[in-house]
Amino acid sequence: MTTVGNGGRHGPDGGGGPGSGAALTLTKKDFASDQEVRWCPGCGDYAILSTFQAFVPELGIPPEQMVFVTGIGCSGRFVYYMDTYGVHGIHGRAPAIATGVATARPDLSVWVVTGDGDALSIGGNHLIHALRRNVNVKILMFNNQIYGLTKGQYSPTSEEGKVTKSTPFGSLDHPFNPVALALGAEASFVARTVDVDRQHLTGVLRRAAAHEGVAFVEIYQNCNVFNDDAFLALTGKETKGLNQIRLEDGKPVTFGPDGARCVAVEFDGTLRIADTADTPEELVYVHDSGHPNPAPAFALANLSSGPTEPTALGVFRDVRRPVYGELMDRQIALATEKLGRGDLGKLLHSGDTWVVEDGGVPVGSFQS
């Protein structure tokens, strides 16, 4: 529960409205809409929604100062269950819509909720450009490695050989590694977590919210109808301790019972999984999410070929880069200073212009 001053959602009659100066107490209920939450029973989306609604009051941001943008897929329903402003966009375009919102209204907290199909198939181009531009939005990508809404076709993150309704003889496609993809676009914040680990998910959300610029968070999310137990190696009671590689800044990366295994640095600079007892202490990798070069984080992202083996979880990268909206504001201010405040005509005619004539009569003009 968080208390914030001078702002609120209750309006002039409810107290705590804008300008009232009254304190506003935020709880999970303030962010839960009156819509019935409806996903398939047992879906991991329930856990993510519950965790997020419990976490978000601590940000101290009133619901009317938040915007959620979703695309098409099971994750798209998220926007209806948050009592904030929201846009349920078309397939794959959530990052583009959110870019417009965030640049036009930098005072708002803008979040994108998307799925592996929505973000990485038709929306792949929009995603990578939002990441490279460092737009001030937080992107939560629910990855269940399947198309759930359309009833079980393979997705861009499905493993090779995946038998589905659309690939009855097995998928031939090599899957995307979402974290590696985001790092390849040089996103300034990249993380991975799982739906059923409330504490870990909350910690990652907390760091993503505090980050200035784009934050990309992959959330492994179980689809118990079409791809059940895809992440059992990382979530099962008997297996998660063997396979979760927890990343903590400033600490050597070890995992397994009593830290018996580790991430070791090879002499060529690559990373591999090794037995801690057989690895010299100086060759055990020490995590640094703030490293300016994305190469170490990229190596961590590629330690495993999928979530069926030891896999890194946590914040891979958290660095400061100029935020797109800030750069845009500076450019507008510079243009205004050079061309004159509010003079659209000067701006439009500031380059080379040609007049097209027909028999000496101007019929149009073109600008370089």
Image: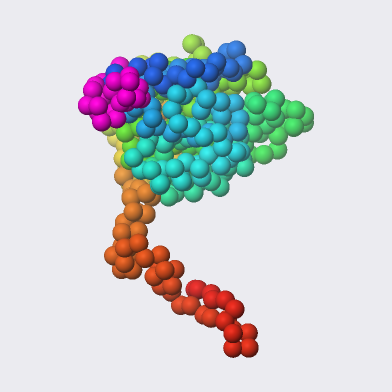
**Residue sitting at 31 percent across and 44 percent down?**
320
Residue 273, image x, y percentages: 44, 30
Q: Residue furthest front?
A: 13
**Residue sitting at 39 percent across and 19 percent down?**
30
Task: Decide whether residue 17 is among the magenta residues.
Answer: yes
Residue 139, image x, y percentages: 46, 35
**Residue sitting at 29 percent across and 20 percent down?**
15
Which corner quadrant of the image does residue 18 belong to?
A: top left
Residue 124, image x, y percentages: 57, 44
Q: From which residue to which does the magenta span run?
A: 1-23
Q: Foreground residue, 170 or 357?
A: 357
Q: Main secondary structure of the magenta part?
A: loop
**Snapshot colouring:** rainbow
Q: Foreground residue, 6 or 143?
A: 6
* 312 w.r.t. 366: above or below: above
Q: Foreground residue, 53 or 266?
A: 53
Q: Residue furthest left?
A: 21
Task: Decide whether residue 38 is among the magenta residues.
Answer: no
- Examine the rendering and report whether any part of residue 244 can be seen: no
